[in-house]
Image (cartoon, helix red, strand yellow):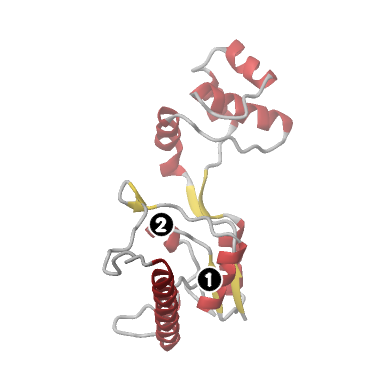
Amino acid sequence: MKILCGYNVNIDSVYRINGAEISELLKSFEKAQILEKMENPPGKILSESDFVAGLVYCMKNGCGAEWLVFEQGVFEFLKNRYLEKSIVRMGGNAGIMANVLSEMGASRVVPNVAVPSETQLSLFSKKAVYFPGTPLQADKEPGKVNPEDESIKNTQESEDARKSEDAHKSEDAHNARTGSTGTSRTQDPIHFVSQGKPLYCDLRPPELQALYQRCF
């Protein structure tokens, strides 16, 4: 069975906090300030007190919440205080499902991860998880070539060449009608980057379908 998992994949950092730690944490803030924010939850984190108030609010009411951190200083506070003592694990529905399906015996599982980091890759199952352009995790042996990967690569190259030729024919026909000389075909392709890294690409259903056809 071959399966494509769409949305979403991330990295979870899980820290289990206890009552003693909460009490110690609360000593650093004005009681009135925390109570005010518990009465009127901000729904986002702009300060350390926002985080503490949200944490205590959820524990008091037995509920969960997902508040975004908007300040770098608060992010550093949370990272320095909890990250080293936390459990880093796979997060996101697609990532978790991909690992389960891989371990349950699927022949190939493709999770939609636009730009996977080394940490993210290390959290995936090593049995049947596959990323386009790379071998199956289980097939990563020095000098070993996956025949299926070679077939996909050759098929994609043929498809790209056909599309390029069709585009050139269309351009030539248009230029013949308009008398235009067109643009140079030797121009380098444009790559969109942000701070030296590829921009995140959120694949939507048509693109997912194309990815599925390419991989399977």
- Rendered residue at 42%/58% (across/down): 115
Per the rendering, the mark at residue 119 is: 2
Labelled pair 1, 2 in contact (Cβ < 8 Å): no
Image quadrant in which the N terminus is located? bottom right
For disc 1, the neighbor class at 10 Å (few under 14, some 14 to 19, many from 20) is some
- Rendered residue at 43%/74% (across/down): 173
- Rendered residue at 55%/35% (across/down): 68
Q: In this figure, what is the number of numbered marks?
A: 2
Image quadrant in which the C terminus is located? bottom right
Residue 77 screen position, x and y as percent: 42, 30
Per the rendering, the mark at residue 2 is: none
Give, as a three-letter code, the residue at label 2: Thr
Q: Say what secondary structure mark 1 lies in.
A: helix
In terms of sequence position, does the residue under pointer 1 or pointer 2 come before the other? Answer: 2
Is 148 in front, or is 86? 148
For disc 2, the neighbor class at 10 Å (few under 14, some 14 to 19, many from 20) is few
15 relative position to 198: left or right? right
Give, as a three-letter code, the residue at label 1: Leu
Q: Which residue is mark 1?
A: 211
The answer to which quarter of the image holds residue 166 is bottom left
146 relative position to 59: left or right? left
Residue 181 screen position, x and y as percent: 32, 66
Give above or below for 166 relative to 113. Answer: below
Is 130 in front, or is 203? 203
Q: Say what secondary structure mark 2 lies in.
A: helix
The answer to which quarter of the image holds residue 22 is top right
Residue 146 screen position, x and y as percent: 40, 85
Can residue 133 be seen? no
Can residue 78 be seen? yes
Residue 195 screen position, x and y as percent: 32, 46
